[in-house]
Every structure is written in structure tokens, then in C-alpha cells.
Image (cartoon, rainbow, N blue to C red):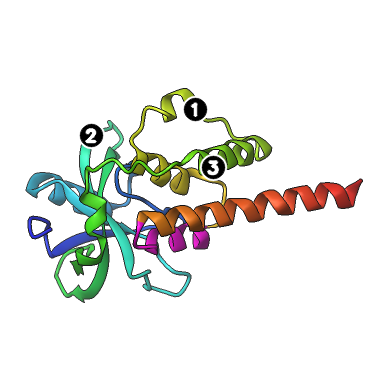
């Protein structure tokens, strides 16, 4: 992954967990992040997303690098972008600068799998069927016909990104290095919610 930049601008955002090979629409209106997006767009279109912690200025040390694939300015000064996920990264240190936004030195080595285009033939039906049941019980609609057109990694990362679970659970999935372990972790999380829902329904009856 030597072609990816070692120093990147980072947009810390609470409650937003972003995965490789997924798309994230963002509505940018705060001046420092307008500056970040414009600088990134004019340079290489690359920027990092990382979840901020509740403590002041603190962030999680695993985030995701994205490429600005769509860029549109609105009449009221906002910028609407779409980020396409490339690879997760580990934050090494913050780089002091005179800019209005933050930059970090990052490393991608442990996430080599993120750039792989090899189709994993592992049977994913168990995860998909669990997810369908979970989404239905949660009242969430997903176009499963279109979903099936995604490649294997996209399916897993899309479910991890949009599932109605906590930000902490999504962060845990983001930090899981291998796809196999990510699937097992996601199945376990969904299974817990399904069990809890079933148990609560039995208790009410």
C-alpha cells in the first residue's frame, strides 16, 4: 500500500463508522471541514474518516481512508460529497500544522486485505439470512435484490456499516483485521440482538 499517503487530513465524526468499499454521503458546512474537503479535492481527493471519542479532541486510532468520488457546491456554501472507502488505517501520530483541520500520520500495513479484489467464496448465506431477519425485526428496509449484486467484501462491510447496532460495536468491527473474523464478530453481534428480541417477546407474553 505504498501508493497511499502516509499523512492525511482527517475528519473526526462521532457515531459515523465508515468501511472500505462502501459509500458515505456527507453534507459539509463547518468552515474547517470545508477547507479540508477543498484541499483534499484539489490535491488527490483522499481524506480520512475516524470516529471521535466523547473526551475532548480524542479519536479512535483506527479509521478509514476514502476518495471523494462526487463533489458538489450548494448555493448556501455547503459542499455535498460522496466518499468511496479504500482502506482502513492505524493512526500513528498527529502532525502539527497551521491549518484549521487536523492531519495524522497513518499506516495501512495490517489492513492489506482491504485492497484485495479477490472474491472470497466463503458461504455467506448464514450471515445474510441472519441480517435479513434482524433488519426486518428492526423495521429497516433494504433492497436485498440490489444488495446481492455487491461483491462479497462489499456485502459484509455494508452490513457492518448500516446495521442498527451501537457505534462501539461498529468500531469493533472496523478494527477486526481479517474478513473471516469480521464475519464471525458481526454474526455474533446480530445473534445477540435476535436472541434479546426473542427473549423480550417471550417475557412480555
Residue 38 appears anywhere in the view: yes
Alpha carbon separation for disc pair 1 and 3: 15 Å
Going from N to C along the chain, the mark reached first, 1 or 3, is 3
Residue 69 appears at what percent x and percent y? Answer: 21, 37
Q: Is residue 87 visible?
A: no
Judging depth in this view, the residue of 10 and 90 nearest the camera is 90
Height in image: 101 above or below 137? below
Q: Is residue 142 above or below residue 92?
A: above
Q: Secondary structure at mark 3?
A: helix
Mark 3 or mark 2: whose residue is earlier in sequence: 2
How far apart marks 3 and 2 lie (CA) works out to: 34 Å
Residue 170 lies in the magenta-colored region: yes
Which residues are drawn in magenta?
Answer: 167-178
Query: Does the stretch in magenta take in 205?
Result: no
Quadrant in the picture for residue 175: bottom left
Horizontal and vertical percent position of residue 30: 32, 51
Of labels 2 and 1, earlier in sequence is: 2
Residue located 30% across and 48% down the image:
20
Give the foreground label among 2 and 1.
1
Disc number for residue 70: 2
Q: Position of residue 188 (x, y in %)?
A: 57, 56
- Badge 3 is on which residue? 126
Amino acid at each position: 500500500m505504498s501508493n497511499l499517503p502516509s499523512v492525511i487530513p482527517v475528519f473526526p465524526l462521532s457515531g459515523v463508522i465508515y468501511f472500505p468499499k462502501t459509500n458515505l454521503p456527507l453534507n459539509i458546512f463547518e468552515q474547517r471541514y470545508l477547507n479540508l474537503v477543498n484541499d483534499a479535492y484539489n490535491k488527490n481527493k483522499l481524506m480520512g474518516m475516524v470516529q471521535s471519542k466523547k473526551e475532548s479532541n480524542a479519536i479512535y486510532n483506527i479509521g478509514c481512508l476514502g476518495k471523494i468520488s462526487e463533489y458538489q457546491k450548494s448555493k448556501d456554501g455547503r459542499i455535498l460529497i460522496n466518499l468511496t472507502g479504500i482502506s482502513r488505517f492505524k493512526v500513528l501520530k498527529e502532525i502539527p500544522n497551521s491549518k484549521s483541520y487536523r492531519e495524522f500520520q497513518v499506516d495501512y500495513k495490517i489492513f492489506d486485505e482491504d485492497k484485495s479484489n479477490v472474491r472470497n467464496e466463503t458461504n455467506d448465506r448464514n450471515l445474510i439470512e441472519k441480517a435479513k431477519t434482524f433488519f426486518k425485526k428492526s423495521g429497516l428496509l433494504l433492497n436485498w435484490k440490489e444488495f446481492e449484486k455487491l461483491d462479497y467484501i462489499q456485502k459484509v462491510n455494508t452490513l457492518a456499516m448500516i446495521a442498527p447496532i451501537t457505534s462501539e460495536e461498529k468500531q469493533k468491527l472496523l478494527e477486526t483485521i481479517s474478513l473471516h473474523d469480521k464475519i464471525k464478530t458481526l454474526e455474533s453481534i446480530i445473534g445477540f440482538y435476535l436472541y434479546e428480541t426473542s427473549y423480550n417477546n417471550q417475557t412480555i407474553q
